[in-house]
Amino acid sequence: MNAVEIEQAITELAEQPFNPDQFPYDFLRAFGNKETTIKRLLNGNMNKSDVGGVLQTKNIHIAIAPSEQTRHRLNTLRNSRATNKYKARFILATDGVDFEAEDLENGETIACAYADFPNHFGFFLPLAGITTVRQIRESAFDIRATGRLNRLYVELLKDNPDWSGDAHDMNHFMARLIFCFFAEDTDIFQGNGLFTKTIEQMSARSPRRSHKR
């Protein structure tokens, strides 16, 4: 999986209702772990946790926290003998409201609302064997924007298949969209959220009719 695919998978996970029993496994899936690996963790063959969590050797130790106990749960993971014995690089705790993690290799930490953890997906990219973390982490929002534009591109073609034969015009349209969003964010357009408000005003409520307006 590449960084854009991981970002999309993580975003979809955060948008789903929090399932404490499934979250550790869904999180690992989002970083490219195969179903055979997930099954071995589920049946205990590979799960080395000593605190009732999920520990993948040389990777990550994840634990679900009781409500409002995320920080305490993270400390439990940090002090776990299994974390040290099985050389987990990351520790992660969440109660579905708060989300905290630490990279034990360099001491970096994140603490955020659960819904916001996709903004920090670059922090965990070593889980997928991606080592250019600094560069990707610094451009994490660019990667998220790229993923969303790609999905927009795909959806536009899906609803308007006759556009597929005119890639030049489609690419030109997407480039204009990117410029307009950039101009809005950097105040080149005068007015708060002017471009977004214009789209809301001029678009049909049904997306299937938007191209006709």
Image: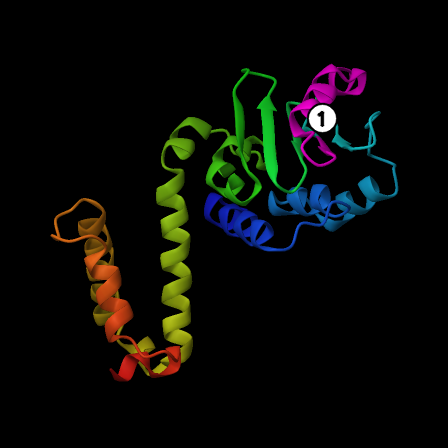
Give how far across and how far down residue 212 sits, in percent.
Answer: 27, 84
User: Residue visible at 42% across and 76% down?
Assistant: 158
Above or below, comparing residue 213 to residue 21 in the picture: below
Residue on which disc 1 sits: 73
Residue 120 forms part of the magenta stretch: no
Question: Viewed as shown, does residue 67 lie left or right of 51?
Answer: left
Q: Is residue 47 visible?
A: yes
How many circles with numbers are drawn on the protein? 1
Residue stretch rendered in magenta on the structure: 62-87
Which residue, as the protein is rendered here, is positioned at the far front? 68
Colour scheme of the picture: rainbow
State the SS at label 1: helix
Circle 1: residue type: Arg
The image quadrant that residue 124 belongs to is top right
The image quadrant that residue 200 belongs to is bottom left
Assign the C terminus to one quadrant of the image.
bottom left
The image quadrant that residue 172 belongs to is bottom left
Above or below, comparing residue 15 to residue 118 in the picture: below
User: Residue visible at 74% across and 48% down?
Assistant: 22
Give how far across and how far down residue 130 sits, in percent.
Answer: 52, 34
- Are there few (<14), some (14-19), or many (20+) residues within 10 Å of tag 1? many
User: In the image shown, does 91 or 29 lie closer to the viewer?
Assistant: 91
Give how far across and how far down residue 68 sits, in percent.
Answer: 67, 33
Above or below, comparing residue 137 to residue 34 in the picture: above
User: Residue visible at 70% across and 18% down?
Assistant: 78
Q: Is residue 87 visible?
A: no
Question: Viewed as shown, does residue 52 lie left or right of 65?
Answer: right
Give how far across and how far down residue 152 sits, in percent.
Answer: 38, 64
Residue 67 forms part of the magenta stretch: yes
User: Residue visible at 59% across and 30% down?
Assistant: 100
Question: Viewed as shown, does residue 144 lie left or right of 48?
Answer: left
